[in-house]
Amino acid sequence: MPEVPQKLTELLELIDMVPDRAERIQTLIDIADRFEEVPPRIARRPFPADHLVPACESQAYVWSEERPDGTLDFHFAVENPQGISAKSLAVILDESLSGAPLEQVAAVPQDVVYRVFGNELSMGKSMGLMGMVSMIAATARQRLAGRQPQPSG
Amino acid sequence: MSEIESRGYVHPEVLVSTDWVAKHLQDPGVRIIESNEDPLLYSTGHIPGAVEVDWTRDLNDQLRRDYLGREGFEALMRRIGARRDTTVIFYGDRNNWWATYALWVFQLFGHDKAKIMDGGRIKWTQEGRTLTRDVPSYPPSDYKAPERDDTRVRAFRGQVLEHQQSKGKLIDVRSPAEYTGERLHMPEYPNEGALRGGHIPGAANVPWARAVNPDDGTFKSAADLRAIYEGEAKLASKDDVIVYCRIGERSSHTWFVLTNLLGFDKVRNYDGSWTEWGNLVGVPIER
């Protein structure tokens, strides 16, 4: 089982150190303030539907860009101006998974969302946020699969 | 006649405008309540004096799948300093989706002095009105609530099955992909919380957000709403209607529209919704 990417572990530990709900919310809002939308060289509006995160009510989009070392940078857009949670998670995923070994990114569990936001998420909200994690992990898996020798015949 | 009244609703008094709210920020008979889908949003700034009521933490039983009981509701209302005669004004994100859900739960306890701020949070912010991060504190009230009444606006699975088998009107307010069951089988899709996809046989599909103008989150006019619900979905105001979605949150929005804006006599929200029906053994499903 691949390890959890080190930067993600560090970020989660940082969030864990804020047990008070109000303070944790403020921490996540501060993180969301660092959100930067996907650069125009990667994508422009209207964004293509195949980059739309399924189940995300905040209309989050995800792109990946390969680095010279073969790892990926992740880029995001969140079309709902009130989608603060989606922006906060986008920053967390970008800062912790961009450049991480693909095997580790591919194995990031969806329930990391509860570690970040707590267990009090509504079902729809948790599904949307887990969809963001799932889409990134799937991108890494697809990239890894593309590197495998293809069966002949 | 106000702009809201001019839209032709049967009960226009259930909506207030952003202007009205701005003029009643200091009104001791009014409590403004923000209820959001996004749990971080209230803390980024809210209408001055508004308290937050979070559906997950404040309106649900924390052990069983059910809403809070009488004592829990009393504790909530006492905490936010609301009295039995306080007019509560709900607003929130996502076209007032969770605001109408909270209002619906308040109906279970007969708190009828409850209204929605038309346009919700998006309209308030679009108009450049004041937001604050100051969390207000009100003197606790001595609110006394009646026992929860689940008979008027809530439907349970047995009632839904009976309703379906007697060809009663059902509205599924989920997306077309959920209605057809297609979404349950999409690769990389998060768990829908149901083992089977599809809809309750006989239910018409009217996605909830069709009732709203997407630009500013306000409700469509009565004529436009009638074209959707009475024209397309073939409902009549005397019909006994049950609405549902995945857990009853989106359908509370449609319940609000049919009951209050179009004046339907009997609309109930099936909050068990697809996460219950799609897991029940032996119930009929259509795709």
Image (spheres, coloured by chain):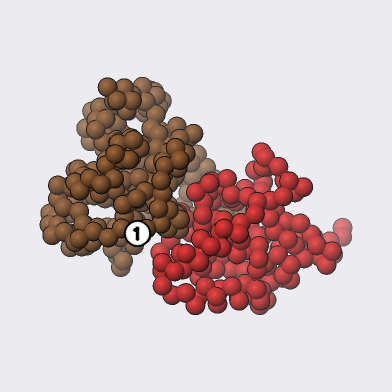
Label 1 belongs to which residue? B135
From what the image shows, is residue B70 above or below residue B131?
A: below
Residue A131 in sight here: no
- Position of residue B137 measured from the top left corner of the image (x, y, whole percent): 27, 60
Q: In the rendered image of this protein, which colour is used for chain B?
A: brown
Q: Nearer the viewer, residue B135 or B252?
A: B135
Question: In the rendered view of the protein, which quadrant contains the N terminus of chain B?
Answer: top left
Q: Nearer the viewer, residue B125 or B175?
A: B125
From what the image shows, is residue B258 above or below residue A146?
A: above
Q: Quadrant of residue A95?
A: bottom right
Judging from the image, mark 1 belongs to the subunit labelled B
- Position of residue A4 measured from the top left corner of the image (x, y, whole percent): 64, 75
For the residue marked with disc 1, what is the amino acid? Val
- Position of residue B162 measured from the top left corner of the image (x, y, whole percent): 26, 43
Residue at horizontal 72 percent and vertical 70 percent from the top? A100
Q: Nearer the viewer, residue B159 or B272?
A: B272
Residue at horizontal 74 percent and vertical 67 percent from the top? A99
Q: Nearer the viewer, residue A104 or A1?
A: A104
Residue A149 in sight here: yes
Relative to B87, is B43 on the left or the right?
Answer: right
Q: Which chain is red?
A: A
- Position of residue B175 measured from the top left corner of the image (x, y, whole percent): 48, 41
